[in-house]
Image (cartoon, rainbow, N blue to C red):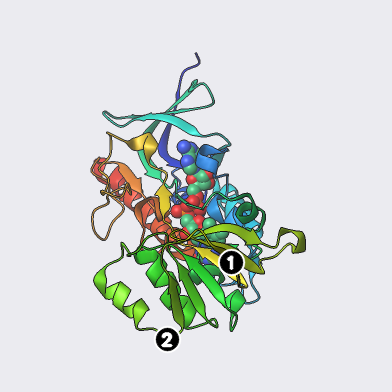
């Protein structure tokens, strides 16, 4: 095996957080290595925005920009500033001593050493798992009301879920769209009482308890026209006409790799010190959705990516 290369800053992930960290670290002359991913957890280089069409809320693009174009620009800027890229997944890490160890490549065969590591592995939206749902993603099926709600202004929409996120998405959409139907599998919600009350008191939101979505229509028309719902008590099925289905059944943070090495919240997201990107291991920082289940936006991920690079730079400067 060849001698492992050593880096001042190693970044895992290449969504808005990872690439912004790369831009800042490169400009600070830290020559970052970005392990940009390959297909870990179904995510790809560029991150979640690679799966969306128009991004209308990223500042600087008044007429919107496609997710792929936006992420290509992030990457070009990071490369132009001097970031080195490896198109591969990080397979194993060892943060027990410094330099930190990160193995990449299918057989965990390439070892990189790093003085600091920035984790920006993101989170993946959970979906129902229906074929029709998959076929109509970005064609009316969405996992982000703040991102896509405005595309369905004035139209009737469906939200699926029963937790705080579903309540938030339904409330948000009721201010933009026509009627909102909230579909939930159980008789009661998991969401906090305050959130439930807000939804129940909203005249634009109808709630279908004990119902499940069995199909999303209409794949033959290539956009959402309705959803088939099943009453789980009677077994009866019917079609609800809708322009969009917002799936709000949670996200899975991409943190398996760090289990046992970094502190996480009970929901699996990485813990960082308030107001910083510092994890419990000095020299390891976390940015973007992997440590944030509240905001989950490209611009906030980019913001914390910047913070992580500055935190890493200050950490290295303090050491020398
Ligand atoms: C369909 C959709 C539409 C959206 N639309 C908008 C929108 O319009 N506006 C908006 O602001 N936000 C939008 N979002 C949310 C936004 O995409 C996220 O908030 C943002 O991408 C988070 O950035 P991130 O860098 O933290 O992580 P991600 O974008 O999730 O990127 C994670 C990166 O980590 C990499 N990775 C994961 N595991 C490994 C590993 N083991 N080794 C190496 N690399 C790894 C992945 O390949 C990926 O590159 C949308 C999300 C979705 C799903």
Q: Residue furthest bottom?
A: 203
As displayed, is residue 52 above or below residue 155? above
Given residues 244 and 275, the one toward you in this image is: 244
* Residue 52 visible in this rendered orientation of the protein: no
Q: What residue is disc 1 on?
A: 238
Q: In the rendered image, which quarter is residue 276 located in?
A: bottom left
Q: Looking at the image, is mark 1 or mark 2 earlier in the sequence? A: 2
| Residue at the outermost top position | 1
Q: Is residue 62 above or below residue 282?
A: below
Residue labelled with disc 2: 203
Q: Position of residue 141 (x, y in %)?
A: 59, 62
Q: Position of residue 122 (x, y in %)?
A: 45, 49
- The foreground one among 161 and 154 is 161
Residue closer to the observer: 307 or 25: 307
Taking the spot 39% from the left edge, 58% from the top edge, the residue there is 304
The residue at the point 56 percent across, 70 percent down is 148
**Classed neighbour count for the residue bearing mark 2: other residues with Cα under 10 Å, few (<14), some (14–19), many (≥20):** few
Using the image as rendered, state which of residue 82 and residue 193 is in the foreground: 193
Of helix, strand and loop, which one carries label 2? loop
In the rendered image, the vertical position of residue 180 relative to residue 317, given as above or below: below
Return the x and y of residue 243 as percentages of the image width and height.
63, 73
- Find residue 147 and report its horizontal and vertical position in percent: 53, 68
């Amino acid at each position: 095996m060849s001698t492992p290369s050593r880096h001042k800053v190693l970044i895992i992930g290449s969504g808005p957080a990872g690439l912004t960290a790369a831009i800042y670290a490169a400009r600070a002359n830290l020559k970052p290595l970005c392990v940009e991913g390959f297909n870990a957890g179904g995510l790809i280089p560029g991150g979640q925005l690679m799966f969306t069409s128009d991004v209308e809320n990223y500042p600087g693009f008044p007429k919107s920009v496609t997710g792929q174009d936006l992420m290509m620009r992030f990457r070009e800027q990071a490369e132009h500033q001097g970031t080195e890229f490896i198109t591969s997944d990080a397979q194993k890490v060892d943060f027990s001593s410094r330099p930190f160890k990160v193995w990449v490549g299918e057989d965990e065969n390439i070892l990189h050493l790093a003085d600091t590591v920035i984790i920006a592995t993101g989170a993946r939206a959970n979906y129902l798992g229906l074929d029709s749902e998959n076929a109509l993603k970005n064609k009316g099926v969405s996992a982000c009301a703040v991102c896509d709600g405005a595309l369905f202004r004035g139209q009737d929409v469906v939200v699926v879920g029963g937790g705080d996120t579903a309540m938030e998405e339904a409330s948000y959409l009721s201010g933009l769209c026509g009627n909102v139907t909230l579909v939930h599998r159980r008789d009661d919600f998991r969401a906090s009482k305050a959130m439930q009350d807000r939804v129940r008191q909203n005249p634009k939101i109808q709630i279908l308890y004990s119902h499940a979505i069995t199909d999303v229509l209409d794949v033959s028309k290539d956009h959402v026209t309705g959803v088939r719902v099943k009453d789980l008590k009677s077994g009866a099925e019917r079609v609800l006409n809708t322009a969009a289905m917002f799936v709000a059944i949670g996200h899975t943070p991409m943190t398996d790799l760090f289990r046992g090495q970094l502190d996480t919240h009970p929901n699996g997201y990485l813990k960082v010190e308030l107001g910083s990107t510092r994890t419990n291991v000095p020299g390891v920082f976390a940015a973007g959705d992997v440590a944030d289940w509240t905001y989950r936006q490209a611009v906030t991920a980019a913001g914390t990516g910047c913070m992580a690079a500055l935190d890493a730079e200050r950490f290295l400067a303090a050491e020398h």
